[in-house]
Image (cartoon, rainbow, N blue to C red):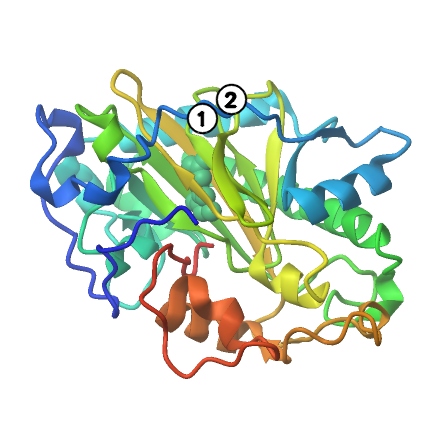
């Protein structure tokens, strides 16, 4: 199993809010040097397997999504109808934000116990080594902190984020039901998606990720291996490669670089969807590498159930041949488990392999933002 052991910190501490400006660093500092990556060379992979690309207008969209979710735990989606102009405006606002000086960006810094605003991606807090990335998390309206960044000119930023979130939510609803249809699941099979199945009251978060050029990309990592926690992620990966997904085949596992597919989003199964489908769909481990010459941005949109909804393997997917793999858990409770056990969180709620203590964790899980 590919791992990033040796740098795991068992409790979140948020020690990384240093004033180091990654954009001006000439040599990789020890704080960002991940020794375990040496053997793998994060950006030098030879595997060029292609993640399935699925057009929403494909007559076999349900079957193809089902197959991709069971094998890869994700796929590219095209034909989604999200206006390209909106994606361009999103990119330009993300660039605008991260191009500000470090001091300016710190005016929008997350405050303790809040996930909104600028900082390292929340998962960074669990590792002694820092990630080669910056992040900005939008769970509520960004008006408060955006108006501190651009007192006279924050409306366009906020409008684009709101419009994009709305598009993403609608796309997630559409994709989730298509994926579940492949397993014979309909809107009648659970009630937390609301009477029309439109996920009203669901938990959503938009994460803006920024990976500056890195002087030593093979020994740094933009985002360590993790699976996303909620139901579904729809990620805008941008046109610069950086995303890698772990492909597991029996006892073999290798990282695959996900090349850009113009106009597509990457859809990832989240841990909760793995639980809901009784392990039929797999939440894939994935990570982001960085490169020497270009910055890269990515924008995942995460969707989960309402915080108090009880997620349990669907009875249609439990049988004598396929016994229930996971106990019921609320999203809120699962987030707490993930914060404590990271990538072992699914094992903690597993009915097969009950765990008392976290193992010597290798890969990591994510927090509020995935
Ligand atoms: O940057 C990427 O491509 C991946 C981002 C990601 O996995 C996350 O934010 O959870
Ligand atoms: Fe992720």
Is 63 on the left-hand or right-hand side of 370? right
The answer to which image quadrant residue 35 occupies is top left
Label 1: state its secondary structure.
helix
The residue at 62%/42% (across/down) is 168
Percent position (x, y) of residue 170?
Answer: 70, 45
Of residues 324 and 39, the one nearer the viewer is 39
Locate residue 183 relative to residue 117 in the image: left or right: right
Q: Is residue 275 above or below residue 154?
A: below
- Disc 2 is placed on an element classified as helix
Q: Is residue 1 visible?
A: yes
Image location (x, y in percent) of residue 297: 39, 30
Q: Quadrant of residue 249?
A: top right
Query: Position of 56 compared to 112: left or right?
Result: right
The CA distance from mark 1 to mark 2 is: 5 Å
Residue 357 vertical position relative to residue 280 in the rendered view, above or below: below
Q: In the image, which disc is placed on residue 88?
A: 2
Q: Is residue 157 left or right of residue 231?
A: left
Q: Nearer the viewer, residue 280 or 2?
A: 2
Q: Residue furthest bottom?
A: 356
> Percent x, y for residue 14?
20, 60
Q: Disc 1 beta carbon < 8 A from ligand 1?
A: no
Q: Are marks 1 and 2 in contact (CB under 8 Å)?
A: yes
Q: Badge 1 is on which residue?
A: 91
């Amino acid at each position: 199993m590919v791992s990033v052991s040796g740098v795991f910190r068992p409790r979140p501490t948020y020690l990384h809010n240093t004033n180091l400006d990654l954009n001006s660093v000439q040599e990789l500092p020890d704080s960002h040097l991940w020794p375990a990556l040496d053997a793998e060379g994060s950006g030098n992979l030879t595997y060029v397997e292609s993640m399935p690309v699925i057009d929403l207008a494909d007559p076999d969209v349900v079957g193809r999504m089902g197959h991709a979710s069971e094998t890869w735990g994700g796929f590219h989606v095209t034909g989604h109808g999200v206006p390209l102009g909106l994606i361009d405006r999103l990119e330009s606002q993300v660039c605008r934000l991260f191009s500000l000086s470090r001091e300016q960006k710190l005016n929008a810094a997350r405050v303790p116990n809040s996930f909104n605003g600028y900082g390292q991606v929340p998962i960074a807090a669990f590792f002694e080594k820092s990630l080669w990335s910056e992040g900005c998390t939008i769970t509520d309206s960004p008006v408060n902190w955006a108006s501190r960044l651009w007192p006279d000119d924050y409306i366009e930023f906020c409008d684009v984020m709101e419009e994009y979130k709305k598009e993403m939510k609608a796309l997630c609803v559409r994709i989730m039901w298509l994926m579940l249809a492949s397993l014979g699941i309909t809107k009648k099979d659970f009630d937390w998606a609301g009477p029309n199945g439109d996920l009203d009251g669901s938990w959503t978060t938009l994460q803006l990720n920024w990976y500056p050029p890195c002087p030593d990309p093979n020994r740094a990592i933009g985002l360590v291996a993790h699976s996303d926690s909620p139901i579904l992620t729809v990620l805008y990966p941008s046109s610069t490669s950086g995303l890698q997904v772990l492909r597991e085949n029996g006892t073999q596992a290798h990282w695959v670089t996900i090349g850009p597919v113009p106009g597509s989003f990457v859809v990832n199964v989240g841990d909760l969807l793995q639980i809901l489908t009784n392990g039929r769909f797999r939440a894939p481990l994935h990570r982001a590498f960085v490169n020497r010459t270009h910055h890269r941005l990515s924008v995942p949109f995460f969707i989960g159930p309402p915080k108090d909804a009880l997620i349990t393997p669907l009875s249609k997917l439990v049988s004598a041949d396929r016994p229930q793999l996971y106990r019921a858990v609320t999203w809120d409770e699962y987030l707490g488990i993930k914060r404590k056990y990271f990538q072992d969180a699914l094992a903690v709620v597993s009915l097969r392999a009950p765990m008392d203590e976290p193992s010597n964790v290798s890969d990591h899980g994510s927090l509020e933002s995935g």
